[in-house]
Image (spheres, rainbow, N blue to C red):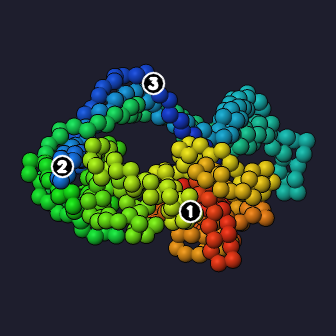
Amino acid sequence: MRALRGVLVLALAGGCFTVESTSRVERGPLLRSYAQDSTLPGGLEGKVAVDGAVVNFAVTAVQTCRTEQFEEYAEERITERQAKGAGAALASGIAAVLGAGVLAVVSLVVSNAPDVSSIDAAGRYGAAPRQHVQAAAVATGGLGLPALVAGIVGAVQSGVDVVSTKTTQVVSSKERPCNPAGASGLLRLSAANGALLSEQPLDGGTAAVPLAALARPVEAVTLGEQVVQLDQEAQRTLRAATACAQLDARQTGDLSTLGDGQLLRLVESQRGCAPLRRTAPEVTDPSFEAELRRRQLAGHVAAAPTATRATSYDEAVAATAPTLRFAEGSGDLGALDAPEPLSGRAATLRGTIEGALSVNIGVVQVADRQLFLVLPNEPAWSGDFSVGARVEVVGILAGVHTVGPRTLPVLRVVWMRNAF
């Protein structure tokens, strides 16, 4: 029974306090630094070269070599536990228990004779002084002992635990292509719509593709399920090869019988092919450019100057260096009263789409003026250019043109984007 009471006292004492626990991590000194190399799957890299009527592809399979620098530190995870109030309980418990002990000792030296000055109804004398002191000792001990036990339990629950470990972190990582080897498999050249242009097996990592097969722009070069990555030089060579293939595929004959669009595409192919065939007569023949210029001066919209190759609005501005700005409140709008002398000059425009005359010819409103916008057959930009859309345009002025009741200046678009 006494043991049970003791267990109950300890349980009650332990439940008197809430133990709060806090943890922190402290980093120690640097133990060591080391590097670790690993090899990861890489990709395919391609080079392109043109040799007469053949386009040679060289495809190399490479891996990725990674070098990581590690640092290893000593680390201590410190957990502190604290039972609030345990110290005060322990101190009061010790004081009370010591007081009870002192009273118990004092009771031994006081009189044990009954108090004859008082008697109860049963005829019994009052308690002796020793009994009073002993009762006080018991009461004081009864208060101090639970507090002492509670303080001891709280002190046992409180403390600090320290766990020492090692931790490693990556401080730098470098990757580079490595282990090049000639690829093997079936090389596929595809157009933008996924149509297969040519399929050739690789022999020692190289394949020869007939130039005539590239009469359409190459959108993807693949080997199995992997895409062959072409650097900028290879991409330029491939575009020039496509231009040469398109030039070879077209029968020019009498230039005056060609439509404006046909002539424009012929000149674009001629210019694109020039880097590969600088001495070819069909490239240097001035009749193409002369006929194009004659039609531009005559106001043929579709024969307006071709767009500069650009991949962004800012790049188009940098490439054309506009000297005119057409926007609401701009002083350059007055120049549109006589647009013919402006032909060939670059300009920026900010306005609202008013309508479309065809797939690549639209009308834009700028303040109280309107202009025809002529877009390339395959624009490199995208966006919402429906009626009412606000747009920013970089373009080249190309005289005037009449469509129905409208006679408006023409702006050949180099780049267009939505304005906000």
What residue did someone put label 2 on? 52
Q: Which residue is drawn at 70% across and 50% down?
A: 325
Q: Do the residues labelled 3 and 2 touch (CB within 8 Å)?
A: no
Nearest to viewer (mark 1 / mark 3)? 1
For the residues marked 1 and 3, what is the alpha-carbon distance in whole angstroms? Answer: 82 Å
Task: Tell me: 194 left or right of 302.
Answer: left
> What amino acid is found at the position of numbered circle 1 in the picture?
Ala
Task: Tell me: 258 left or right of 408.
Answer: left
Q: Residue 2 carries which label?
A: none
Task: Tell me: 361 left or right of 290.
Answer: right
Seen from this angle, which residue lies furthest right? 117
Q: Residue at x 14, y 53 (%)?
A: 208
Pinpoint residue 278: horizontal percent, then vertical percent: 30, 43
> What amino acid is found at the position of numbered circle 2 in the picture?
Gly
Residue 310 vertical placement versus 135 (above, below): below
Q: Which residue is drawn at 65% across and 51% down?
A: 342
What residue did someone put label 3 on? 28
Q: Which of 20 and 204 is in front in this view?
A: 204
Pinpoint residue 375: horizontal percent, then vertical percent: 53, 64
What residue did someone put label 1 on? 298
Question: Is residue 239 something that shows in the picture?
Answer: no
- Give SS at disc 3: strand
Of mark 1 and mark 2, the one earlier in the sequence is: 2
Q: Residue at x 91, y 41 (%)?
A: 117
Pinpoint residue 85: horizontal percent, then vertical percent: 68, 40
Seen from this angle, which residue lies furthest bottom? 404
Of mark 3 and mark 2, the one earlier in the sequence is: 3
For the residues marked 3 and 2, what is the alpha-carbon distance in whole angstroms? Answer: 68 Å
Question: Is residue 291 something that shows in the picture?
Answer: yes
Q: How crowded is mark 3: few (under 14 residues within 10 Å), some or many (20 or more)?
A: some
